[in-house]
Image (cartoon, helix red, strand yellow):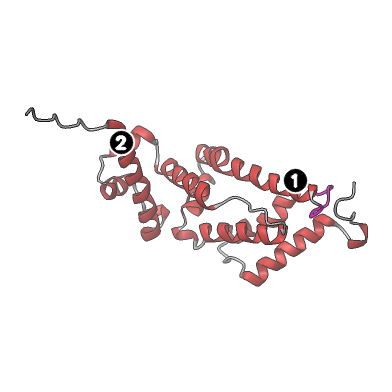
Amino acid sequence: MEATAPTPPDPARRSLRARRAILDATSQLIAEKGYADVTIEAIAARAGVGKPTIYRWWPSKAMVTIDLLIEIAEQTTGYADTGDLAADLRTQMQGLIAAIHPPRTSPLAGVIAEGLHNPDVARQLRNLLLEPQLELFKDRLRRAQQHGQLSRDADPDVALYLLYGPLHYRLLYDLGMPDARELDALIARALNAMNGPAELRPAPGSA
């Protein structure tokens, strides 16, 4: 009986395992040490790969982290549509708060901070992560307008500033994140501002 030849290693599968190990190592190290103190050398050592393997896919620590954030966003963010716009915004904003606080050990806060003095990082963060999330936000607002949950005159860009501006202001100056009561008040005031006085609002479903 002839011996079966061993199956040769699959380079593609090996590459996927290495990539997974690098992203996991990046996440672990940022949680342990903070973004600023993580190095490519430390990521390579934790992942069990050489630095050239990392640089084959990413030019910098920031780009590894942005890919990690894209993966997290695909799994955990987005806007539900339960029919209750305030509740859906609260769910998404609570997820964002968890992602950026505490800022020292937040991969998102770390990349935002680096982007303040590195235009290329800022551009990549905006193009690869922020813009797709903004489209999801605007799509949820459009559906709310179609179902009479939000004034048809509401400007999505203004809505963005009203809802998320305070979170980024708090992040920038390390003021802490709003608690549940403060977050509910922020959402309520933003929606009230966008909808206008109650007596001027059209009835749900009206043209």
* Amino acid type for the residue under numbered disc 2: Arg
Residue 87: quadrant of the picture: bottom right
Determine the residue positioned at 90% across, 46% down: 207
Picture coordinates of residue 79, whole percent (x, y): 63, 52
Residue 114's mark? none
Q: Is residue 142 left or right of residue 50?
A: right
Determine the residue positioned at 48% across, 49% down: 72
Mark 1 is surrounded, within 10 Å at the Cα level, by few (under 14), some (14 to 19) or many (20 or more) other residues, namely some
Per the image, the residue denoted by label 1 is 142
Q: Quick check: is 155 in the magenta stretch?
A: yes
Name the foreground residue: 98 vs 51: 98
Q: Quick check: is 40 in the magenta stretch?
A: no
Picture coordinates of residue 186, whole percent (x, y): 71, 64
Residue 16: quadrant of the picture: top left
* Amino acid type for the residue under numbered disc 1: Arg
Picture coordinates of residue 118, whole percent (x, y): 50, 41
Which residues lie in the magenta part? Answer: 148-157
Determine the residue positioned at 42% across, 53% down: 35
On screen, 86 above or below 155? below
Which residue lies most toward the front here? Answer: 1
* Magenta span dominant secondary structure: loop
- The local secondary structure at tag 2 comes to helix
Which residue lies most toward the bottom here? Answer: 181
Determine the residue positioned at 38% across, 46% down: 23
Q: State which tag comes first along the sequence, 1 or 2.
A: 2
Picture coordinates of residue 185, whole percent (x, y): 72, 68
* Distance between the alpha carbons at the discs numbered 1 and 2: 41 Å
Residue 13's mark? 2
Q: Is residue 114 left or right of residue 148?
A: left
Residue 40: quadrant of the picture: top left
- The local secondary structure at tag 1 comes to helix
